[in-house]
Image: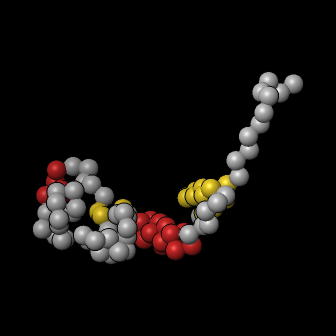
Amino acid sequence: MWPFKSVWFIRVRAVFIVDDKAKLRIMFYYPQELGRNMDEILRAVKGMQISEANEVAIPTGWPNNELIKDSVIVLPADNVKTAKERTGATDCYDWWFF
């Protein structure tokens, strides 16, 4: 017996992006009242492809980011030697943007 007097079902629209190794990479959930944004879905797929191929992070609003445009973020160095080697090697807006 169901213990609750009423049951609320919430309808959502979902998008699942699965890579070629059958690994779930991205999940988007939209409320029923809101349509899916294909531009955002394509941006996410392209960003994941670039991130995987180049071991970089994709900033908010990429590729139209106000500050760094279509540039990406190099993942942080895991040691001081690597961090020093990177200094001056690329455009840098702050210490975390190598």
Give the answer, above or below, for where 64 lies relative to 77.
below
Q: Is residue 28 shown left or right of residue 53?
A: right
Res 55 quadrant in image: bottom left
Q: Is residue 38 visible?
A: yes
Q: Residue at x 67, y 58 (%)?
A: 32
Q: Is residue 86 visible?
A: no
Give the answer, above or below, for where 36 lies relative to 14.
below
Q: Residue furthest right?
A: 1
Of the pair 75 and 70, the residue shown nearer to us: 70
Res 1 quadrant in image: top right
Res 61 quadrant in image: bottom left
Q: Residue at x 24, y 69 (%)?
A: 67
Q: Is residue 15 shown left or right of residue 55?
A: right
x and y percent of residue 79 in the render?
A: 21, 49
x and y percent of residue 20 in the render?
A: 61, 66
x and y percent of residue 56 in the render?
A: 35, 64
